[in-house]
Image (tube, helix red, strand yellow):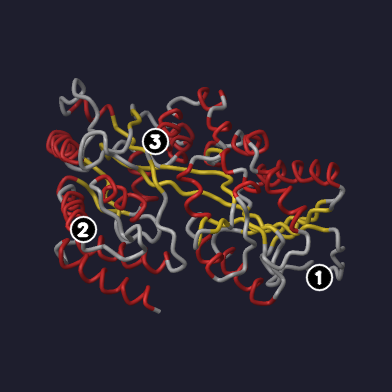
Amino acid sequence: MKIRILLLFACFAFSSCGDGATVQQDTLKFGCFLNSPEHQKELETMLAEFSKAEHVKVELIGLNWSDGKTKLISAFNSGTEPDIIELGSDWVAQFSGAGVLSKLTPQEIQSERFPPVSLGPAIWNDSHYAVPWVLSTRIMFVNDGLREKAGLSQLPYPKTISELKDQASIIQQACGKGVYGIGIISQDLHQVYKRVLPILWSNGGDIISKDGKPILDDSLNIEALHAYASLVPFGIIESAKQLDKMFIQGKIGFWVSGPWLLEKIPKEQSSIRYGLALVPGMKSETGLSFTGGDYLAISKKSTKRAKALKLIQFLTSSKQTMRLCKLSITAGIPADIQGQQDPFFKTIPGFTVFIEQLGKSRLSAVHPKWLDIEYAFELAVSQVVYGEQTPLTALREAQQTVQAIMAH
């Protein structure tokens, strides 16, 4: 069956771009974020197989991460939304809260296939609205060469923020100008909270309580942000992209990053000797990392819900998801538990640390206004990192901001 590829660079609405063609009634429209030509080609093949088996056409609407969400919102507002939508984990609540997604039962999701933590973002007001597809997390990259130069090679990798601070300070003092103990991220939208919020979690803190109330100025959060700020004198403050680059260049001792860095290091022909470790926490064995992911949902107005659900179940199966994950380690890890156990991941040096970290990770709070809440938290972190506010005053201001956000 024919798979129509519509890349929405010039097109604003979710319809054919200038050819005047009419989408037939038995056509499923699938709004998906295409990461690379290889990803698109393999996905086309998968959809062709599904089309042949289920006797339904699939129209693949390609989105990009820079403006895809805006185009999805425009499509819902104009009534031209796809039947199936790929959403980032922190977007699901916004769309489900707006009442534009179809409710799904645990049986339809086949929830037993997924880790419980991955189902959290799919739930709003006790109902399920999306199915986890792929997940990704961050681990700590360690420059073994700098640790050796600083006389730390006989010590284990840091498991606590206190140990991380001690080792980062020794590296910075021993290795001289232009070398930094740790990478510190600040003023990098959607990146700061992914590295700082897990420190709060590891101390028993959080941004939103289990009963849905903001708790940014909780004493546990203040203590954790103090700990993060204590790392600043022994690091360099930069964007995530720049810190990735500096780690590859051998200028940073410790840096929390994702699987893309594992792929970049050999591509850059770096001579760095490095190791991989779980993210440290406030206390030993409490370290947690952030997990994000991509989810698939069905439009509430879709007239082809049954076929749409079949396509979601097909794509999220471990067998099909692994076809995409094998193209690049940056594609993520299958949300399906069986896929996470695939022998393929053991063939990638160090990647098993990501699988282990995934089991010690969390996703951000589920709230329709999460992106606004996230911004308030990241601003507070930035103010503390640059010494403009104490953790107490910054988090108190953020608490007031988030209270106002959630009240409207």
Q: Can you tell which mark lies on residue 385?
A: 2
Judge depth for marks 3 and 2 and give the one in front: 3
Mark 3 lies on residue: 357
Mark 1 lies on residue: 18
Residue 168 appears left or right of 58: left
Identify the residue at horizontal 26%, vertical 62% (top origin): 216
Q: Can you tell which mark lies on residue 223?
A: none
Identify the residue at horizontal 76%, vertical 41% (top origin): 45
Identify the residue at horizontal 76%, vertical 68% (top origin): 15
Closer to the camera in the image, 118 or 156: 118
Percent of width and height locating residue 231: 18, 47
Q: Amino acid at mark 2?
A: Val
SS label for mark 3: helix
- Mark 3–mark 1 distance (CA, rounded to whole Å): 47 Å
Q: Amino acid at mark 3?
A: Gln
Closer to the camera in the image, 266 or 86: 86
Residue 338 appears left or right of 24: left
Closer to the camera in the image, 147 or 373: 373
Q: Amino acid at mark 1?
A: Gly
